[in-house]
Image (tube, rainbow, N blue to C red):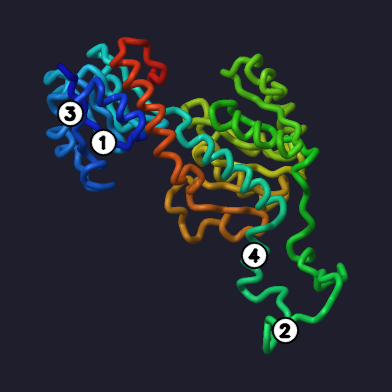
Amino acid sequence: MKKKLVLCTSIPNERMEEIKQYCDVTIAGELKHGKGNVTEEIIREECKGYEIVVLGDENAGADTLKEWIASGMKFIGVAKGTPVTVDNNTLKEAGIQLSYTPGRNAQAVAEFNIGLMIAVSRSMVSSAAGLLMGDHLGEPVENIYNVPDKKNVIWGPLDENHPYTDYGIGCELYGRTLGIVGYGAIGSKVAKICQAFGMKVVAFDAYCPSEKMEKDNVKPVSRDELLASSDFVSIHLPVTEETKASVNFEWFSKMKKSAFLINTARAAVIDQKSLIEALENKVIAGAATDVYWQEPVPANHPLLKMKNVVCTPHMAGLTVDVDNWSGEIMAQDVIAYLEGKERKYIWTR
């Protein structure tokens, strides 16, 4: 007799075929009703009576989980990097492990991280915005397709009218040093990509074995050594009591004046006032961030007005590929459970 599985998030087709060999699959939650259209009351009823429950963004508190457990639930998975939408304490009390999808958007965030590094160090955003606002433009022409015959079309000379007077001259990534703070799924991918650019990579992570970094040709260093030597300091820390506001003015004062801070993790790990003061007083060269202390970011936030700062609206982890990564990771744990094998992706917090 096949097991009963209720699915609220997408799983790649080839993996679904494997799962269907063991299970009768029912679609529910946001996969059935659409994003943002599912209350906890709806999901509680739809997922009751299933041995295997696979959630996406749906919430499941203690009362909901207790109902599911009483009706036979033995496996639960949440297709999120941090499955805080589910009360794990209730699951622990019942002896049920929680599967999740770590690193599901690691590639997306890592690639975006590199984009921010280039954008802030080469003034891409401010110079592009300047053109749109009318800065450094030539006079209108009657016919843009009537192009003069010139062998070498360049903007010159480098005088007071050149864009560099507004935006400065940037630096290459090649040969520069990247300092990674937090060497997890995203940090390690950033390291690999930056090595392809010819960067030297150092990392600080109190909880990551130095052997792992060294295997990736990344040099493990102390925090202060990283700050003193890095041209780019890239933050990849989770928010914990230990890390909240830990990146403060002391950090910035130990960085090179020519260095850039990059943050695609969470704003809460950075002391907001310290960062603003460091940028206003040119303690560091600039910063790029995809995350904020309030989201959406307030329209009057000082970072939005700074030429040496690149701000994006928390988009680093969003690509059309993330759902596939997430579904693949979750499918691995579902299949392991169905085959009586040890699951790989268990949330332990």
Identify the mark at residue 64; answer none if there is no mark.
Answer: 3
Q: Residues within 10 Å of mark 1 (few under 14, many from 20)?
A: many
1 and 2 marks in contact (CB < 8 Å): no
Q: Quadrant of residue 20?
A: top left
**Who comes first in sequence, dot 3 or dot 1?**
1
**Who comes first in sequence, dot 1 or dot 4?**
1
Q: Using the numbered discs, state the Cα–Cα distance from disc 2 to disc 3 in whole angstroms.
A: 69 Å
Q: Is residue 221 visible?
A: no
Task: Name the residue carrying label 4.
Answer: 128
Task: Please provide percent x and percent y for residue 267.
Answer: 51, 41
Q: Using the numbered discs, state the Cα–Cα distance from disc 1 to disc 2 in whole angstroms.
A: 57 Å
Q: Using the numbered discs, state the Cα–Cα distance from disc 4 to disc 2 in whole angstroms.
A: 25 Å
- Name the side, left or right, on which 252 lies relative to 348: right
- Name the side, left or right, on which 231 lies relative to 327: right
Task: Name the residue carrying label 2.
Answer: 146
**Who comes first in sequence, dot 4 or dot 2?**
4
Task: Please provide percent x and percent y for residue 41.
Answer: 15, 38
Task: Please provide percent x and percent y for residue 131.
Answer: 65, 71
Q: Residues within 10 Å of mark 2 (few under 14, many from 20)?
A: few
Front: mark 3 or 4: 4
Identify the mark at residue 240; answer none if there is no mark.
Answer: none
Q: Is residue 120 visible?
A: yes
Identify the mark at residue 8; answer none if there is no mark.
Answer: 1
Q: Residue at x 53, y 52 (%)?
A: 312
Vertical placement of residue 115 versus 340, above or below: below
**Who comes first in sequence, dot 1 or dot 2?**
1
Classify mark 3: helix, strand or loop: helix
Vertical placement of residue 215 versus 80, above or below: above
Looking at this view, is 271 or 108 the one in front?
108
Classify mark 1: helix, strand or loop: loop
Looking at this view, is 317 or 278 the one in front?
317
